[in-house]
């Protein structure tokens, strides 16, 4: 680990872990927040929905900002803003201020999250990305597992405001660290890749490179129209999926999803005509990148939808309290933390295709095992199913993320990171919406897995990761790519993706 890479890895890991921890501890704090601020349940739900909509709608644009102006710079702004918004929420006088600051926190989270992957892509050689991504994934799993326990302890001892102060010191520290460490000037590389043919960078021996400003520089190079259309489409999609998961929210959810479809069609039309589109054609034409995103979308939808059903089963049917419920599914988090470091050597030996296929099979098997549970199911079958879920998901997450980040040109690393994070935000909303609708449609026995339809449907969604995994590159393709150095394009030429 070099002196340049250590701060990058620290910022990436801590930033991703803080965001994961924030989401899990908030769930524990919401009842106390509602009582203390005398808020309605619909208002409290917006503390989560507002954050999710803000994050999902801005992730790709935030990645584009990192590609152009530097990932550490964007990361630092996001981390410091996240710390400031968290402090403001802890001091908020009412629910309206909490919701507004949660939206601001979502904007800062959108700046922070793609940069955690963009920084890794620019700091580590492509053939060594697996290990830092595995460390990042293990940290996310540990944070998600510790969240309910830490949140419960803080709320019980100090109240709900302490939950938001929990993330202030680490985000403040990594934001300042990102500011004071030097970054390779990837924005110059991005401008060189975006420059029209015929323009060349003038280099002088004793001076930094002089980069002519391309005609489409500044705001136009960021494709603001495309960013707005994508934000509207993703925001409406997430809002619709979250709304459909609430009692009586199906109609509004369908309308929001329909609006997202219209905005998506307008985005596709605009991107085909844009000179510098927000979504680079190199990424969208890359089969490994698209397949990796499909794997992440299906896997996250299946996992979070399954956990939603399992939580109701364990608490409402079997009568367990939240702590006992968390302990029953603890093997999931344990396998994520312990399994993440094993994924890079597996991927190097067997290739992304075979590794991800095995992960998809484990995840689907875990969902099917839970789907067979009766009302009297004991600790062992629940724990075994949770272990399969954790093992399958961590393999898929590390492998697919490595492929997406590895196969994206370095000048588009931020957009690739934004797309990866978008899949990881839309997937859970989709899975929970599907589970909720099917639970409602089965008036008797819906919460008992063996008598309901939710988990079989989620198993089908999980199985969709199998054909996507088969589209990932094999071991031989990755070895040939590494030997050729395909990810380091010659100076002055546009980077390309070999699918």
Image (cartoon, helix red, strand yellow):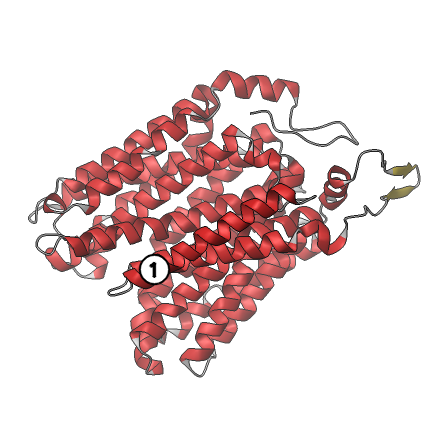
Q: Residue at x 18, y 37 (%)?
A: 369
Q: Extreme left residue here?
A: 376
Above or below, 483 against 359 in this view is above
* Residue 318 image point, x, y percent: 11, 55
Above or below, 188 against 150 in this view is above
Q: Is residue 348 left or right of residue 115?
A: left
Q: Residue at x 25, y 47 (%)?
A: 306
What residue sits right under mark 1 in the picture?
253
Q: Is residue 313 left or right of residue 204?
A: left
Quarter of the picture containing the C terminus is top right
Residue nearest the observer in this picture, 374 or 273? 273
Residue nearest the observer in this picture, 45 or 227? 227
* Residue 491 image point, x, y percent: 78, 30
Q: Residue at x 30, y 53 (%)?
A: 433
Q: Residue at x 51, y 29 (%)?
A: 287
Label 1, secondary structure: give it.
Answer: helix
- Count of marks placed on residues: 1
């Amino acid at each position: 680990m070099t002196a340049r890479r250590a701060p990058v890895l620290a910022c990436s890991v801590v930033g991703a872990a803080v965001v994961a921890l924030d989401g899990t501890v908030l769930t524990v704090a919401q009842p106390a927040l509602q009582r203390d601020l005398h808020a309605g349940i619909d208002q409290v739900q917006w503390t989560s929905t507002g954050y999710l909509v803000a994050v999902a709608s801005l992730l790709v644009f935030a990645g584009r900002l990192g590609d152009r102006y530097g990932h550490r710079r964007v990361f630092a702004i996001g981390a410091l803003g996240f710390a400031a918004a968290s402090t403001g929420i802890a001091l908020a006088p009412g629910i309206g201020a909490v919701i507004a600051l949660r939206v601001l926190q979502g904007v800062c989270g959108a700046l922070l999250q793609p940069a955690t992957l963009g920084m890794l892509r620019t700091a580590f050689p492509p053939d060594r990305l697996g290990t830092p991504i595995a460390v990042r994934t293990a940290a996310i799993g540990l944070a998600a597992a510790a969240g309910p326990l830490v949140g419960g302890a803080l709320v019980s001892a100090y109240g709900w405001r302490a939950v938001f102060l929990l993330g202030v010191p680490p985000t403040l520290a990594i934001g300042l660290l990102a500011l004071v460490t030097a970054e390779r000037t990837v924005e110059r590389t991005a401008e060189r890749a975006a420059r029209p043919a015929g323009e060349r960078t003038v280099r002088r021996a004793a001076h930094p490179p002089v980069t002519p400003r391309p005609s489409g520089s500044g705001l136009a190079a960021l494709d603001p129209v495309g960013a707005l259309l994508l934000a509207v489409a993703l925001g409406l999609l997430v809002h619709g999926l979250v709304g459909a998961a609430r009692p009586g929210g199906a109609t509004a959810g369908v309308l929001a999803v329909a609006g997202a479809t219209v905005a998506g069609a307008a985005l596709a039309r605009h991107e085909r005509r844009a000179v510098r589109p927000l979504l680079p054609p190199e990424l969208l034409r890359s089969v490994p990148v698209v397949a990796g995103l499909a794997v992440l979308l299906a896997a996250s939808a299946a996992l979070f939808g399954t956990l939603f059903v399992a939580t109701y089963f364990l608490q409402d049917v079997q009568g367990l309290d939240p702590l006992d419920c968390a302990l029953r599914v603890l093997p999931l988090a344990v396998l994520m933390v312990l399994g993440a470091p094993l994924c890079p050597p597996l991927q190097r030996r067997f290739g992304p295709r075979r590794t991800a296929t095995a992960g998809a099979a484990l995840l689907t098997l875990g969902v099917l095992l839970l789907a067979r549970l009766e009302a009297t199911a004991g600790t062992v079958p629940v724990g075994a199913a949770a272990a399969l879920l954790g093992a399958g998901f961590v393999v898929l997450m590390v492998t697919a993320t490595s492929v997406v980040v590895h196969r994206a040109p370095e000048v588009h690393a931020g957009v690739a990171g934004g797309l990866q994070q978008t899949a990881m935000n839309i997937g859970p909303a989709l899975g929970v919406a599907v589970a909720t609708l099917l639970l409602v449609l089965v008036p008797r026995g819906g919460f008992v897995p063996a008598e309901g339809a939710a988990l079989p449907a989620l198993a089908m969604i999980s199985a969709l990761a199998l054909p996507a995994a088969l589209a990932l590159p094999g071991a031989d393709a990755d070895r040939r790519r590494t030997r050729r150095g395909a990810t380091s394009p010659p100076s002055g030429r546009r980077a390309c993706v070999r699918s």
